[in-house]
Structure formats: structure tokens, C-alpha cells
Amino acid sequence: MELPEDVRALFEAPNYAHLATVRPDGGPHTVPVWVGIADGKIAFLTSPDSRKARNIAADPRVAISVTDRGQPFTMAQVRGRVATRLDGDEAWTIIDEISRKYTGQPYPLRTDRVVFLVEADHAHANAFG
Amino acid sequence: MSELPPELRDLIESGPMAHLTTINADGSPQVSVIWIGLDGDDVVSGHLGWYVKLRNIDRDPRVVLSFDAPRQPGAFMNEYAALRAHATITPGEEAWDLLNRLVKVYVSPDTEFPAPRGPGFVVRYSVERIGGKGPWAAG
């Protein structure tokens, strides 16, 4: 599905998102990640050897939760699956874009990172208060 | 796990937006944002409806609570906590009392919880592993 505009805006802003995957034993794993939008999809970067990358290799289903850094009661939740893994120049272009958003600088590493794009099945934003 | 580190207790009591991850019936992950507080060395949350996250916990009590520490200017990766926990649900009106306590942390000290007092569910999280980045995280 296409991301609703209010959901997309929360992922385009320099907010931290929390990415949930499923461990080999079926239990949950969650870590904060930098996120962006690429090709209309939620993008995040990771080492290909990280716990989350290994979880995704076994089961691509993910859930992502984000709150606005300035207005924490403005939030979005997305469920879907990792549909695309990008390597090489295509990945580094997106990684640098995401890094600039959070730090103002390109990403400091040039090895050991890949980009995953998430195909959303459910996405909604909420604002309380 | 017996005692939570004081820095983690302080972070929890400061009122972070907590991402609660549970496992859906089909085995996929689900995340929602909740308010949390402390009761002894357990983390607790209050809910007034039998939501998906509670149905998930009822089926599989393995959860993660993850939340960010306040932003640190210039930090490459911000501090955060990721707590693996075993969750248990208790029905009762204490859920509203807990929400009325937490609203004073998350909204303002003189706010009353806006929903009428009524039955709900308290979720108690027994922390099994503390992860993340910060003084509370091993390694």
C-alpha cells in the first residue's frame, strides 16, 4: 500500500523509529533505527550481520513505530514486510541522505551497511492531546 | 532479574513514550506506544480496553519495551533502553488508578485521567534482560 501522507511525514522528519522483528524462537526483537523514505517506501539501514538483519532474512515481517521528536503524542505505526534489500552505490546514496537528515553529514562508514525497504500492509498515524 | 539500575529507573519515571512489541497470532510483530511506570522492580502499564496488544500478551507473554533517552546534541546514536520482559495481565479498576498516576507524569501534574473510572487491565512486565545503549546496558 501507499503510505498515508501523515505517516510518511513522520518518517521523512528526523525522528527515531523503533523496528520490531521476530527472533528465531518466535519472540520479539526491537531496536531504534534511523529511517527515511525511498521509492515511496520506508527505508532503514543496518549491518547485514545485525540481529535484525538475520531475523529479517528468516522472516521478513516487521512492525515500525515512530513518534514525533517535538510532539511525542503524534505517532505512527506500520506493519509490513521487508520487500527489497539494496547494496552498493544505490544503498550508499540512501544512507547518506538519511544520515544528513539526522546529523547534517554523510554517513561516516563505507562498509558493512545495507538498506532495507519496507512494503507496508497497514499504516496509520495518531495524534493525542 | 532483581534490581533495575537507578539510571533506568530515572528514565522510566521521566515518562518516555514506550514502544511495546508483542507477537500477533500469525507470528508477526506488532508495536504500539504506551505509557509506563514502575511498581517495585517491575514496569507497569494500564489499559481500559482489551486491545490487540493485550490479546497478544495473553497468548504469548514475551514482549519488548523500547524507549529513547532524551536527545543528546551531537550524539551519533542516541541512548535508549530495550527491555525484554515477561508480561502478565491483571484485570481490575487499578488500571484506571495507574493511568491517573501516569497522566501526571506524561501530561501535567494537575491533570486527571479523562476517561471515567472503570474496569481495565494492568500489565506487569518482569524484566528479563536489559539492552540498549546507556549506563543501564551491559557491554
Image: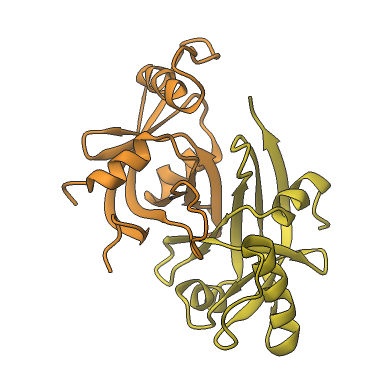
Chain colours: A yellow, B orange
Rendered position, B72 above or below A82: above
Where A117 falls versus B61 (above or below)?
A: below
Instruction: Specify the quadrant that holds the C terminus of chain A.
Output: top right
Q: Would you identify the image quadrant in which residue A84 lies? A: bottom right
Q: Is residue B63 shown left or right of residue B108? A: left
Q: Residue furthest left?
A: B2
Q: Quadrant of residue B96?
A: top left
Please provide percent x and percent y for residue B51.
Answer: 54, 35
Looking at the image, residue B96 lies above or below residue A14 = above
Give the quadrant of residue B130: bottom left
Q: Quadrant of the N terminus of chain A?
A: bottom right
Q: Give B92 or A66, whichever is nearer the viewer.
A: A66
Q: Position of residue A62 (x, y in %)?
A: 59, 62
| Residue drawn at point x = 49 percent, y = 20 percent | B108
Query: Where residue B54 appears, x then y in whole percent?
Result: 47, 39
Tally of numbered tags: 0
Residue at 53 percent across and 80 percent down: it is A47
Which residue corresponds to the image point at 48% horizontal and 28% vertical from the top-left? B106
Q: Is residue A64 above or below residue A59?
A: above
Q: Nearer the viewer, residue B73 or B108?
A: B73
Left or right placement of residue B108 versus residue A98 in this view: left
B32 to the left or right of B62 = right
The location of residue B104, given as percent across then percent down, is 44, 20
